[in-house]
Amino acid sequence: MPRAGTDPARIVVFGNSGSGKSTWAIAQSALLGCAHLDLDTVAWEPALSPPTRRSLQESQSRIDTFVSANEQWVIEGCYADLLTHAARSATEVIFLNPGVDICIANARQRPWEPHKYSSPAAQERNLEMLLEWIRQYEVRTDEFSLLAHRELFSRFAGAKHEFRSNARDGRSESLPETGGVESA
C-alpha cells in the first residue's frame, strides 16, 4: 500500500556482505507492507554445486518481473550489476556501509540462511571463505566491491542515504539510526 501523500516506496539497499542489508530490508518491507526481494534468489541457479551464477539477462528479467508485479518493494543485495538495473525503477537507495569489522562481526552472528545453504553446518563450513571475501571489500574492483557500490550511490539521482553505523534508534529495532548518516 503506498505511503499517504507520497510516491510508492521502491527502495534498493546495498552494501558489503554482513552490512545488515537483509535485516534492514526485511524490517522496512514489513513496516511498509511491501514486497521484498533478496538478489541472491535471482542471481544464482538453485541447488547447483558448485554454485553457478545465472546470466545477467536472466537475472535482470527476474527483477523486471518482480518490479512489474509489485507497486512497492525493497530490493537488497551486493551485486552492483543487478542493483544498477533495479535502481532504474527505484525511488530511493540505501547504502549500508558500517565498515569491514562490523560486517565480519555480523557475519559471525548470522542465523542459518536456508535459501543459501542446505544446513547450518554447510553455512558454517563456508564462513571462513565469506569472512575473507568481506575483508577484501575495500580493495576488490568487481561488482561486489566498495568501489562499485560507491559508484552506484553517486550516480543515483533520487533520494539516497549512506549509513555508516548499524546502531539503532527508537523507530524500529531493525533500522539504522539517522545519526551519522551521510545523504547526498
Image (spheres, rainbow, N blue to C red):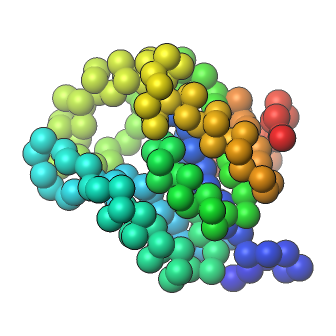
| Residue at 46% across, 35% down | 144
Looking at the figure, which quarter contains the C terminus? top right
In the rendered image, the residue lying farthest to the right is 5
In the rendered image, the residue lying farthest to the left is 49
Is residue 51 left or right of 177 when viewed as pictured?
left
Q: Looking at this view, is 107 or 58 the one in front?
A: 58
Is residue 157 left or right of 146 when viewed as pictured?
right
Q: Quadrant of residue 142?
A: top left
Query: Is residue 22 in view?
Result: no
Is residue 117 left or right of 131 when viewed as pictured?
left
In this view, 24 is above or below 100: below
Looking at the figure, which quarter contains the N terminus? bottom right
In this view, 152 is above or below 66: above
In this view, 67 is above or below 16: below
Q: Position of residue 49 (x, y in %)?
A: 10, 45
Query: Is residue 73 in view?
Result: yes
| Residue at 82% across, 30% down | 180
Q: Quadrant of residue 41?
A: bottom left
Q: Quadrant of residue 57?
A: bottom left
Q: Position of residue 101 (x, y in %)?
A: 54, 17
| Residue at 53% across, 52% down | 83
| Residue at 64% across, 33% down | 150
Q: Looking at this view, is 46 or 115 the one in front?
A: 46
Q: Position of residue 48 (x, y in %)?
A: 12, 52
Q: Position of residue 178 (x, y in %)?
A: 82, 41
For the image, the number of numbered tags is: 0
